[in-house]
Amino acid sequence: MTLPSARLIDPSAVPALRWGVIGTGWIAGYFVDALHGHTGQRVTVVAARDADRTGVFAAAHGIERVLTPPEALFDLADIDVVYIATPHASHRDLALRAIAAGKHVLVEKPFAMTAAESAEIAAASRAAGVLAMEAMWTRYLPQSDVLRQLIGDGELGEVTQIVADFGSAATYDPTSRLWDAAQGGGALLDIGVYPISFASSILGAPERVQATGLVTADGVDLRATALLTSAGGAADAVVSTSLLARTPASAMVVGSLGRVDVLPAFFAPSGLRVTRGELTEEWIDDRFSQRYDALGYQATALAVYVGEGLVESPLHPLDEVTTVLRTVEGIRKQLTVTPPLS
């Protein structure tokens, strides 16, 4: 059994876009470093509300300009694309402002707080003719391309089952965004979107969603396990997430001819173990010693799509982004209400 090679995009063969970043959190730092270290893309300005903190961030990550407030970035004529790396609740407003200013946008996951907000961003980007894309980096990893080829070439036969999890043991902190429903707190939007999106990338939108788990009376989902049944009932996905316990963060795709285990952490660069009958072969992604250097893949892909005049990612269409958030909402509605943590 010979596994396919990942089809990588040459970073030097795509348009070199001028990026502005909104937000100075840890993911923004890793993203900028990945772009500067492994792509031809360049971040030339960072914008946030705290001028001092933003200045420190810019100096640490080699960014020339600092702006406050964040909205000032939209007036710059020399910025092609805006990466929005702010808390969840601000994604919709910032994305719409950027799109109205004619900027392409890469929005950190979750793309928006609700399916309705996601659809609103999608409609705006299509009307404006600019690209909008969720920063679901998993879609653009080499292992994801290998998996797509295995499924597309029929190496697994008919896919019948998917299993994926992502849970963390988060310390309760009432001052943290993670524990505030108004700011998108809870497991589902923060990390649960990864296994749900993974299942969606293979099975598409579920026809039926059955879920169990816990949500606090003030709307913070603590844990959830869902059975997602594909259209026509040909396949199922079991996805789980939690703020109460750390899980392996593994994924598995089962077909009539074989199985693929995506090694932990499945959402980051890891590897694949492919089993067909008595044969097993592994594909390991060891390109980067720092996993977040792989954030550059999504930026390179975005530059390709911009160069082609696209308004959404063919690997992760906006309607699918919206469907994933609709699935999140369907799961949350079925959870058992429990008193708020204290």
Image (cartoon, rainbow, N blue to C red):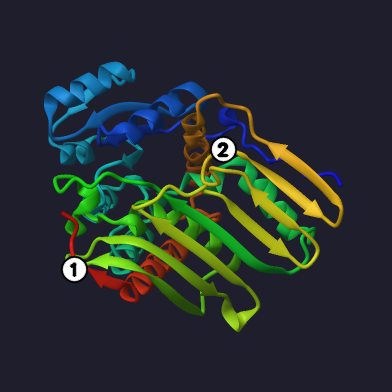
Is 62 left, or right, of 7 in this rendering? left
In this rendering, the answer to whether 195 lies above or below 23 is: below
Q: Name which quarter of the figure residue 259 lies in.
A: bottom right
User: What amino acid does circle 2 point to?
Assistant: Pro
Proximity of marks 1 and 2: CB atoms separated by less than 8 Å? no
In this rendering, the answer to whether 295 lies above or below 157 is: above
- The percent coordinates of residue 56 (x first, y second) are 21, 19
> Which of the two residues, 102 or 229, is positioned nearer the viewer here?
229
- The percent coordinates of residue 79 (x first, y second) are 31, 34
Residue positioned 78% across, 58% down in the render:
153
Q: How many numbered marks does the figure carry?
A: 2
> Which of the two residues, 215 or 27, is positioned nearer the viewer here?
215
In this rendering, the answer to whether 258 lies above or below 247 is: below
- The percent coordinates of residue 45 (x first, y second) are 27, 28
Mark 2: secondary structure = loop
What is the quadrant of the C terminus in the image? bottom left
Residue positioned 51% across, 72% down in the render:
227
Instruction: Please give the label number shown on residue 217.
Output: 1
Instruction: Please give the label number shown on residue 129.
Output: none
In this rendering, the answer to whether 259 lies above or below 20 is: below
- The residue wearing badge 2 is 269
Q: Is residue 5 visible?
A: no
Residue occupying the far bottom of the picture: 232
